[in-house]
Amino acid sequence: MPRSSTRWFAQRLAQMLLVLWVIATILFLIFRLMPGNPLVAYIDTTFTTEQKQALIHSFGLDLPLWQQYLIFLRESAAGNLGRSFSFHAPVAQLVWETLPNTLVLMLSAVVVAFLLGTVTGAFLAWKRGTVVESIGIPLVLAVRSAPEFWVGMILLAVFSFSLRWFPSFGTVSPGAQYASLWQRLTSPDFLHHLTLPLITLVLYLQGLPLLLMRSNMLDVMEEEFVVMARMKGLPERRILLAHAARNALLPVVTAFALVIGYSIGGNVVIENVFSWPGLGRLLVRAVAAKDYPLAQGAFLLIAAMSIVMNLLADVAYTWLDPRVSYAKR
Amino acid sequence: MRRQRVLRGLVFGIIAAMVLATAQPGPSQAQASRVVRELVLVTWPQAQNPQQYESARIAAEGMRQLGLKVTVRTMPWEQLADYVWEERQKWDMTTWQMVGRPERSDPDEILVNLFSSSTAKDGYNFVGFIDPKYDGLAQAQRSATDPAARKHLVDQAQQVLADAQPYTFLVNPKSLYAYDNQVWDPHTIVEQKGIGIKNFWTFVQAAPKGAQKDMVLNALDPILAINPLYISGKVDSWITELIWDRLVRIGPDGLPRPWAASAYTWVNPTTIDVTLRPGMRFHDGTPVTLDDVIFSFMAPKGDKVPMYKPFVANIADIKKVNATTLRFVLAKPQAAFLTSTLGKLNIVPQHAWGPMLQSLEGKKDNAQFLQEKAPVGSGPFRFVSWTRGQEVVLEANPQHWAAPKMHRWILRTVSNVEASLGGLRNGEINFLSDYLGDPMVLNRLSRQDPRITVVASTDIGFQFIAYNERRPPFNDVNLRRALTMAIDRTMIRLVAFKGYGEMSDSPVSKALEYWHASRLPQYSRDVQAARDLLKKAGYEWDGQGRLMYPASQSETLEVAR
């Protein structure tokens, strides 16, 4: 690696750490500034002041705010995200248990959406000015703008409640036991449960790559090298695939990395509609219950992943398009 | 220079006049300060609890007819509870609810904790109701071991509350559950008084009709913990009840009956002998001994099991009488001991929990933070698995003397109410155990599909509006009575609860037929009578119809913010 790139990389890394620290600080403050109190979940007819004090002490909320903050920073830096107030289990364990469900749903949806979106986008660009385009584009926009919960409920009503083709909640059938995570994720039962949430999410995600690809294609088709290829007498399909599409794909690749980055947090709406035990639902609960450690830890993790994916997108860009170089700056 | 000063004086004068004019819209200053301030009724957001929100709106409308300015303000539950609990001087009125639980089949818990002066400072008496006569009755019923005498005291306590109206009691809601009658034999589904068909007895007795032998249930909220020494949540308690035995269980009739104890006898008002059922075994095969029972009741006396500590506080000593019998000696007589202590504590294996509690010595953690990988009890169901956010699987314990007839008991977390209904129709679940949706929708479903049986039962729980007696005018009993008379409670029952509730007049639910006092004053809706009552108490109305305190009193408080 040339020296300038090394320096660029080091700079980016420092930037990332700074951003993470800012996010951590905001997270720390935001949940504590919100009205409410993590102890209300314990209010009961026999709840005593003694019990309350014991809880405050065991949660570490009896320390001054700045001390809580320093402990939080120190522990997060050491990779210890603390223990959830409501689940009483380590945050890392809670995230670890729900993350695979979220990742499988998100990644498969993003991949399918981008494959489908790019191909359809290129196709619609090719069909510029035809009936196909005048039907296709409004259709894509309509599907993209339909609320996810609505699409999800319609799919449930039709394919689950009425036709009974697909189950209506969860990731596997009641009581199904698997020897390992891998066995569970690859079982036909799991894939059966995955179908409806996957379709819902794909319908939601396909708009971005599709429209991006189409507009890029339209731009690229005007470029001189395409005209040149046409003049050379190359077949239209070859021009489209080998010349235009390859170049139009660049921004789509970046978008892909970014979408994965912010999909890590899960999709609260879809997870709720399909009772999908993912990170999104865990987070909503954490925020509602004022579960500071769980909310902070999980959001911090999401932020970190999102920042890393951003970096990867940048790196991918320089690699795919040599004209783009960050090192010179 | 002088002109400037005059000008400035003039400007100040105008501003001062304007300020004074806006500050006293009333006819005169003396009268204005007698006008009751704007009162704030806090409640849940509509999305979080539509019943309470609607109740608050309808109640506020009634209060306004007395000449009060009432604002309904919503807060998410977490914020509302914090506000009501921690800022006891600040709020005026709130909607609130007590939920039904088997232990609340005995009125002791509610009567003592909700209205005793001792819990006004930082306990559940958040309204600050102080009445020495009531305190006497509540304590007297607690130690009255003669049932008839106790019943009389409980009636009197309810009478005091009905006269004082610290709350406006709204309804005892109906709990709604449904099941697939092709999977479960309806004769084996048990309705427990004040609890409904989702209860321990149903789970132990439900008999499958055909090949489907697993009961699949739903819960909206995820399981937080499966821990016999931690009261972690509503849904969690369904599970702990099944895995761990208790000496006594609350029967379908709402009264305590022997369970892991084969018998009990009161030797005197502070001594009870309990005989342990012979041949009991924990799920790991070890026998349940008297030492395990002693451990289960003595461990919470230390500092490591805080949530169960209040329930064993009155136990002075536990002795072995012979090989099968224990003698509990109480510090003072406690009539509800069977329900509130013997029926509440889980019998845990000392060989598992002894070392675990020991490992906590000197640390700030307590037993609530311990989660066994495979919890071990002696109850009718054994733990199989727990997939977080998705399901808990238990299986029948064939060695148990009350072995369940079903094969497995599977509780699914279903966050989408419609999906739980769809799942009931699909057969994905066969027992709807958690439903907060529209009762009409569920009933329609059962009409369309004869396989689905819906059972609505009046709950032990109750819904109410609480008045902060620390803040005038709520310290005046006449005003509280007038409020109850002005509120259209029938409308609340019919609109907010869609008719799925029974009018409530006491903290003791009508579902508890034995304990509920008959012939309590009813305060039927009558705005004119409410206004007359206020007039008689010295209240007046100003020219704009606003309610004013009696002549000797004036408004001293700011509007609750």
Image: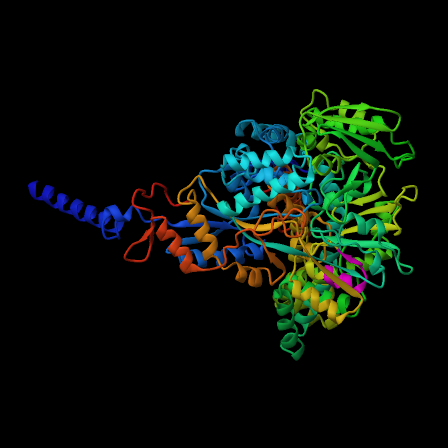
Q: Bounds of the magenta span?
A: B420-432
> Does residue B350 appear in this view?
no
Is residue B141 found left or right of B319 in the rendered image? left
Q: Is residue B429 magenta?
A: yes
Quadrant the C terminus of chain A occupies: top right
Q: Nearer the viewer, residue A121 or B353?
A: B353
> Does residue B52 appear in this view?
yes
Q: Residue furthest left?
A: B2
Give x and y (percent) for residue B259: 82, 40
Q: Residue at x 62, y 66 (%)?
A: A146
Q: Residue furthest bottom?
A: A131
**Up-down relation of residue B161 to residue A248 (above or below):** above
Q: Nearer the viewer, residue A212 or B111?
A: B111
In the rendered view, how is the structure colored? rainbow
Is residue B4 found left or right of A306 in the rendered image? left
Q: Is residue A320 magenta?
A: no
Give x and y (percent) for residue A310: 64, 46
**Up-down relation of residue A125 to residue B62 (above or below):** below
Give x and y (percent) for residue B320: 83, 23
Q: Residue at x 61, y 48 (%)?
A: B517
Q: Nearer the viewer, residue A70 or A304?
A: A70
Residue A207, quarter of picture:
bottom right
Residue B69, quarter of picture:
bottom left
Q: Nearer the viewer, residue A25 or A165?
A: A165
Q: Residue at x 72, y 21 (%)?
A: B361
Give x and y (percent) for residue A128: 64, 74
Q: Count how many numbered circles sit on residues in the image.
A: 0
Quadrant the N terminus of chain A occupies: top right
